[in-house]
Amino acid sequence: ADQFDYDVLVIGSGPGGYVAAIRAAQLGLKTACAESRETLGGTCLNIGCIPSKVLLNASELFKEARSGTLARHGVKLGNVELDLPTMLADKDEAVKGLTGGIEFLFKKNKVDWLKGHATFTDAHAVEVAGKSVTAKNIIIATGSSVTPLPGVSVDNEKGIVVDSTGALSFAKVPERFVVIGGGVIGLELGSVWQRLGAKVTVIEFLDQILPGMDGEVRKEAAKIFLKQGFEIRTSTKVTGVTVKGKKASVTIEPAEGGPAETIEADAVLVAIGRRPNTEGLGLDKIGLELNKRGQIETDHEFATRVPGVWAVGDVIPGPMLAHKAEDEGIAVAENIAGLTGLVNHDVIPSVVYTHPEIAGVGLTEEAAKERGAVKVGKFPMLANSRAKAIHDTDGFVKVIADAATDRVLGVWIIAGPAGTMIAQAAQAMEFGASSEDIAYTCHAHPTHNEALKEAAMAVLGKPIHI
Ligand code: FAD
Ligand code: NAI
């Protein structure tokens, strides 16, 4: 790297960027990572995956304690109270610990953290905090941020009309909470505040929640959320949100047009998707153009069209997920080091961390049928002994296999621990498993994963317990 300050410079320290930086350093490359935020870890560790999961866990514990479901297990409690400041402080503590952990890993692996916003000056140089830094390879891992809803202004400080960041820190539980967008964020953060006492209304533009997921899963999930007390307004659009004092009025109408209606709320969450962060990066200086969706395109090695410039994570096409970004981060570093780094984009699990959890990997039944004949096996959690024994029977496992070859094309799960169960399905698919392979693998009893085995047996036509 004689003519350059570094072999590798990564822009952004989210799951894509920090993992790429650590792997590059492990492979003997002199590496730096620029991050404009005050702590490392990106969206995921600071305002995404981690804080949301802390609140999902804590709010579920609160709900179980207060709703009396624990009493059914023989656990009787006295007066159950919410201590929201402690819950929020515990979340902040988790974020601090994990972001600090990345700082420790950077030091351990000798990755230099360049504090500040990086802008390209040419394909091998960026400016960070007024200083020019050069590198033989530059990886763009700038992530994504909230897509704004035209005409609706978010103010996370005020805490009335917020995005996901504001909804991680409400000072008190909103009595009426309107969530715009029935996607992953809306349902996860809607669940948090619903469990803590809010009356939640989800406004979804499409005719169903959770776009991109398997059709049956979307229907079953909606049923479960309704049972939990959510109000879900599908095929509905928001035409405006106004704030007066401490209240917001949300004006909605049918997506196709029709009579307007107003909902009063103490808080409104805008969660209609995220968009890639490319502004202020100086991409014009290196002649790198974006695709129609504002993303940076790469080849399968994660190289952009500009030699020496690479990109991974939310800023490139594909699902905006932390584990996808991480795997791409490892692959790009290995490719830069002259090894072969690959990511199988056909087998990336996705999980919604509500209760029950909702998870999938591979094709939906609808997409699989478009490609050819399929066989589908389903098994309800109600017939799974472990789920039944612990009173957690919502959901099912569904295995979709190629009708001719029996190769598993997709697995969809709604179950308490679906997010953990889906890893087994992803591994099987990565190894090219047939449903017969899963059906004839010995599964420990009594576990939730036996439902996956039985769904695979159902593909072959013969489950035992139903
Ligand atoms: P990011 O994590 O967005 O990191 C990019 C970093 O780059 C940021 O820190 C930013 O400050 C920095 N940056 C940007 N531009 C510059 C610049 N020019 N110079 C210097 N620094 C710059 N995914 C999951 O898989 N599981 C979950 O449970 C999950 N939960 C989520 C919950 C919420 C509320 C949100 C919002 C997201 C969640 N996600 C989850 C998505 C996940 O956070 C992202 O997919 C992931 O963070 C993407 O990683 P990344 O490295 O591409 O970018
Ligand atoms: P999303 O794409 O999951 O859902 C957005 C929803 O809003 C969709 O259902 C969409 O149809 C709807 N919508 C769009 N415009 C609308 C409008 N004007 N009015 C009403 N509804 C509208 O996006 P979300 O929930 O904001 O999350 C962003 C991304 O963050 C996710 O796609 C996911 O990649 C990531 N994420 C992942 C999590 C996980 O893995 N557990 C958790 C949270 C976020």
Image (cartoon, rainbow, N blue to C red):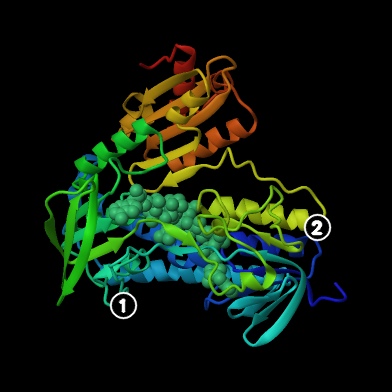
Left or right of 239: which side holds 405? right
> Where, by quadrant of the figure, is residue 22 drawn?
bottom right
For the point 71% across and 58% down, the residue is 305
Q: Nearer the viewer, residue 184 or 138?
A: 138
Asked if the beta carbon under badge 2 is closer than 8 A to the nearest atom of ligand 1, the reply is no
Picture coordinates of residue 263 (x, y %)?
13, 59
Picture coordinates of residue 341 (x, y %)?
73, 49
Between marks 2 and 1, how big is the CA–CA gap? 44 Å
For the point 59% across and 31% down, the residue is 429
Q: Name which residue type carries label 2.
A: Ala
The residue where tag 1 is placed is: 157
Crowding at mark 2 (Cα within 10 Å: few <14, some 14-19, many 20+): some
Left or right of 30: which side holds 224? left
Among all residues in the image, which is located at the extreme right? 2
Picture coordinates of residue 440 (x, y %)?
56, 18
The residue where tag 2 is placed is: 337
Residue 184 visible within the image: no
Which quadrant, please, contains the C terminus?
A: top left
For the point 39% across and 48% down, the residue is 353
Asked if 267 appears above or below 407 in the picture, the reply is: below
Left or right of 417: which side holds 2? right
Earlier along the polypeptide chain: callout 2 or callout 1?
1
Q: Nearer the viewer, residue 307 or 459?
A: 307
